Image: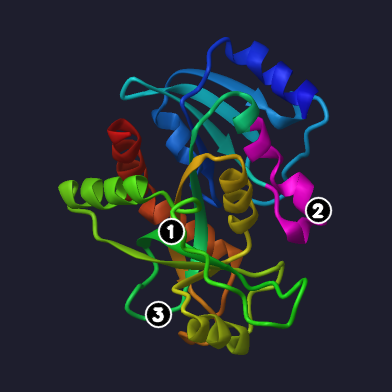
Amino acid sequence: MKSAIEFVKKQLGDIPEIAVVLGSGLGSFANRLNNKTTIPYEAIPNYPQTSIIGHSGQFIFGTIGGKKVLAAQGRFHYYEGHNLETIVKPIKLFHGLGIKTLIITNAAGSLDKAFPPGTIMGVNGHMDCTYRDSCEDPAMMNHAKYHDEALLKGFKTIANNLAIPVTIGTYCWTMGPNYETPAEVQNCKELGGQAVGMSTVPEIQMGAELDMSILGISLLTNYAAGISKTELSHDEVIETANQTEAKFVQLLTGIIKNI
């Protein structure tokens, strides 16, 4: 990571305070940044490239509310063939730049009809439901080192001030690239999950290992398989994200200004 970190440092010329990982269809937040510097992933030495629709593959550095923010438009997924070390490279890069606060966003499936598509969920717990290493039920990880209590409180306060309805819940990580079966969705529900997706958990775990303050935010873009009769598609994910992006960007902007 040393060559990648040094390259990005030279491009920025300043130290960001907050890093934001932007999930599928949520990249428009970067348009709110002022005095922007753009760094394509392909220009960074020894750095992976994105391949998923809705992940443009670049860093945007700028300011918002007086805060210096580095936003990642695009992440890496296990199902793309990347190993875990590659998936968490953005987090290691953020830490290498001296960033202490990490906001991780994603598009996820709702496990509860009470949380319809378009719902914004603050993450207060996560589970690794990939069953890569064991057939045992995954542990609920809700310690403050993974999900910062002050940042979650700020998430709820800003949402209330902006009159944006939100919920709080647990995010379940599955391997992908296929959407979960109804049986897998039922299993996640029984374990205590409220949302399911194919990213985020490795990033949270690395951020915690590096002693970063972490806030996870899920935009629930669809009902998970078996919750409704609607056929699942990535197009639906992007469409719902586009419909909700103004509200999402307003909330994220308020949270950053409040940090």
For marks 1 and 3, give the CA distance: 14 Å
What kind of element bears circle 3?
loop
Residue 80 magenta-highlighted: yes
Residue 73, numbered label: none
> Whole-Å distance between the Cαs marked 3 and 2?
31 Å
Whether pointer 2 and pointer 1 mark residues with C-beta atoms closer than 8 Å, the reply is no
Task: Give the mark nearer the N terminus: 1 vs 3.
Answer: 3
Q: Residues within 10 Å of mark 2 (few under 14, many from 20)?
A: few
Q: Which image quarter is the C terminus in? A: top left
Kind of residue at badge 2: Asn
Compared across the picture, whether 95 is left or right of 5 comes to: left
Could you say which is closer to the camera, residue 55 or residue 167?
167
Residue at x-position 75% and y-position 61%: 79
Residue range of the region highlighted in magenta in the rendering: 76-93
Q: Amino acid at mark 1?
A: Leu
Q: Which residue is mark 1?
A: 219
The image shows residue 36 at horizontal and vertical percentages of 49, 19
Badge 2 is on which residue?
A: 83
Examine the rendered structure and indicate whether residue 237 appears above or below residue 45: below
